[in-house]
Image (tube, rainbow, N blue to C red):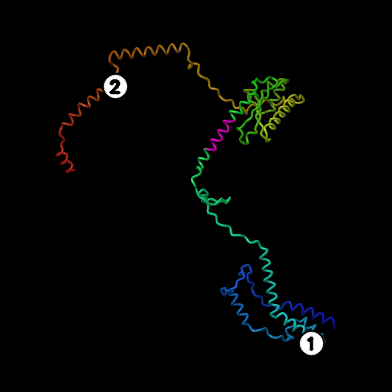
């Protein structure tokens, strides 16, 4: 008999948790009014109307045992109980129902919910409202990422931005002037006289500098050398070297040109080119395969036409004498025309024409104009 009773107790405790209870909406405690002597008045809300409606509701109905409301499993166990156990079951179910529908339990749950909500709000960090920054004149229409805000009021104690740029340029010029006056003369102690490279230095390196500015082409190094200047190379080895360098060889000047910019510094690129030349020379001296079956191919080189001044156009002594004779002959002919009066003097001819125009103007002004006839002709038209 104990087993059905325990089973009924378990079912009763499970069903008692399913009894719904009325929950009231919690109020926000973060906006409570501080302690004050006057009463706290506030506007009525929908929650107040709901509370008033709940207060006007009828109290819960008294407990009454209903055998038909039991589920089949509980009903089966209930039928196995004795009359005393059935009475005890009904009394325990009544006590649980009255406890779950009591106002004290509801108030307690409401207090626990309100306290939990308050604790959660206290844990949430409160963000202060960010003041709105009005953009200044120079930042108008742009996103102010640095938050500089509005421009300061001009007090007449500063110069314009263009003047600041001119001042910065003037400072830079004076800095270079001080360097030229005080530091550059000291470099004369390190100056060395220029000496032509000797025959044992056939390699010529060329560097590019941008006077302190950062540029991706500043690391590039160009190497040039003449194949005939390399020491200890026979003609067959030199030809093999020309075949190895390929399109980097210029057949007109017999110069090999190579460059490197793979590394970050000029010293590394120069070292790489030097090692590459050593490797080429060592390979050219290798007599195991001299590439005799490979012909020289210079199709990559496009010779540029060299224009020469024609020999007939060059100024010689005979040409000078001929030109001077022609000039003297043309001068004599012009002098003969002038003496014969065949040459026209431009200024005299212009003065003569101006005098003729001045004589004709008074004669034209003295002649009467046919005004009446012209008016009658206009009317007829």
Of marks 1 and 2, the one in the foreground: 1
Q: Residue at x 44, y 11 (%)?
A: 321
Write down the quadrant of residue 227 in the picture.
top right
Q: Is residue 142 left or right of residue 93?
A: left
Percent position of residue 171, x then y:
55, 35
Number of the label disc, if any, that sits on residue 87: 1
158 versus 203 height, above or below? below
Q: Which residues are magenta?
A: 167-178
**Label 1, residues with CA under 10 Å away: few <14, some 14-19, many ≥20:** few
Vertical side of 281 occupied by 25: above or below: below
Query: What x and y, as percent, mark residue 193?
Result: 64, 20
Quadrant into which the C terminus falls: top left
* Circle nearer the N terminus (1, 2): 1
Is 83 drawn above or below residue 338 in the view shown? Answer: below
Numbered mark located on residue 347 in the image? 2
Q: Pinpoint residue 197: horizontal percent, then vertical percent.
A: 67, 21
């Amino acid at each position: 008999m104990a087993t059905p009773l325990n089973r009924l107790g378990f079912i009763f405790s499970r069903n008692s948790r399913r009894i719904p209870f009325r929950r009231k909406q919690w109020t926000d405690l973060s906006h409570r009014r501080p302690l004050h002597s006057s009463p706290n008045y506030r506007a009525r809300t929908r929650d107040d109307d709901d509370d008033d409606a709940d207060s006007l509701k009828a109290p819960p109905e008294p407990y009454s045992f209903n055998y038909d409301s039991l589920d089949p499993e509980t009903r089966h166990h209930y039928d196995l109980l004795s009359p005393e156990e059935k009475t005890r079951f009904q009394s325990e179910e009544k006590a649980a129902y009255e406890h779950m529908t009591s106002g004290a339990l509801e108030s307690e749950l409401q207090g626990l919910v309100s306290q939990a909500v308050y604790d959660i709000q206290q844990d949430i960090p409160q963000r202060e409202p960010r003041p709105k920054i009005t953009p200044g004149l120079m930042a108008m229409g742009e996103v102010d990422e640095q938050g500089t805000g509005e421009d300061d009021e001009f007090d007449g104690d500063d110069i314009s931005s263009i003047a600041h740029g001119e001042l910065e340029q003037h400072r830079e010029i004076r800095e270079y002037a001080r360097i030229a006056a005080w530091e550059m003369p000291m470099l004369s102690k390190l100056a060395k006289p220029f000496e032509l490279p000797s025959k044992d230095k056939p390699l010529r390196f060329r560097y590019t500098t941008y006077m302190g500015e950062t540029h991706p082409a500043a690391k590039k190094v160009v190497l040039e050398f003449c194949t005939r200047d390399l020491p200890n190379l026979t003609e067959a080895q030199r030809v093999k070297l020309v075949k190895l360098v390929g399109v980097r060889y210029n057949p007109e000047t017999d110069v090999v040109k190579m460059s490197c910019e793979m590394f970050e510094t000029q010293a590394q690129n120069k070292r790489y080119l030097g090692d590459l030349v050593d490797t080429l020379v060592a390979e050219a001296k290798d007599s195991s395969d001299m590439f005799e079956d490979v012909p020289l191919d210079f199709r990559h080189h496009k010779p540029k036409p060299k224009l020469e001044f024609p020999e007939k156009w060059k100024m010689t002594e005979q040409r000078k004498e001929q030109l001077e004779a022609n000039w003297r002959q043309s001068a004599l002919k012009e002098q003969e025309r002038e003496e014969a009066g065949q040459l026209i003097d431009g200024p005299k001819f212009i003065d003569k024409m101006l005098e003729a125009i001045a004589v004709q103007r008074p004669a034209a002004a003295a002649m009467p104009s046919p005004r009446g006839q012209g008016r009658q002709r206009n009317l007829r038209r």
